[in-house]
Image: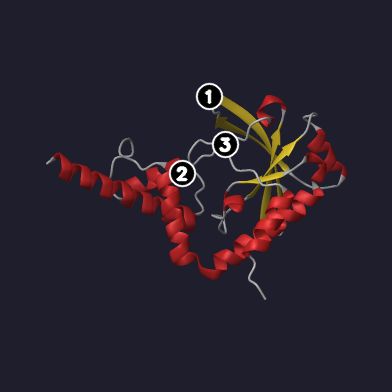
Amino acid sequence: MPNRQNARSQRLRQTIAAEAARIMSTEGQRSYLLAKQKAAERLGASTRKGLPSNAEIEQELKNWQLLFGGEQREDRLLELREVAISAMRFLAEFRPRLVGPVADGTADQFSRISLHLFADDPDAVVHFLMEQQVSFDQERRRIRWHDGSQRHVDVLVIEKNHDIVELVLMLGRDALQAQPSPIDGRPQNRLSLSELEALINQSSPKP
């Protein structure tokens, strides 16, 4: 009996993960927690226990994109990466690093381009954008750090031609280590401009 219950529980976890991935792919939900809770509610399952991990949802998200993304998603990913290159060149003095879905290849039509910027002066990036007459909004985001503590990071958001670029300001000790990934809690992979250019060249079709 326990083995049968475990099998049912595992099948339900996978079903919830697949539905959460569909929600993220089609409805633009960016929060893994909200996506899995919404999926569980739709399936009539508990939203408090037995929910899939973010890593399980991420795998189902990749499966969804392989099945339904097609060339359109690949074209969009390339487009986002090219916009990221332009932004990184523009912000070169702040040593930008690309993180998130555009870096790891899971980006879709709802994804933001996320850049980590480094500066000793907390106002340096703001002053630079103002001098360049670039409009932006400001956000403050709470994240769980590697030691389990809660920290706040400042984010500048630029929207241009329907693309959204978020600039995460990396200051002080928080700049020494990449932020934890929402997928597995490990330090996020950060791509430099040269690494991103090499990645695009590797993925481009040969003539």
In terms of image quadrants, where is residue 82? bottom right
Q: Would residue 42 be visible to someone looking at this image?
A: no
Estimate the x, y position of residue 181 in percent, counting from the top left: 54, 39
Would you name the residue on which mark 2 appears? 32
Of mark 1 and mark 3, the one earlier in the sequence is 1
Estimate the x, y position of residue 50 in percent, counting from the top left: 30, 39
Residue at image x 41%, y 54%? 60
| Mark linked to residue 147 | 1
Mark 2 residue crowding within 10 angstroms, few (<14) / some (14–19) / many (20+)? many
Tag 2 and tag 1, C-beta contact below 8 Å: no
| Mark linked to residue 187 | 3
Which amino acid type is marked by label 3? Pro
In terms of image quadrants, where is residue 105? bottom right
Answer left or right for 146 relative to 126. Answer: left
Q: Nearer the viewer, residue 66 or 125?
A: 66
Looking at the rendered structure, the secondary structure element under dot 2 is helix
Q: CA distance from mark 1 to mark 3?
A: 12 Å
Asked if 116 appears above or below 70 in the picture, the reply is above
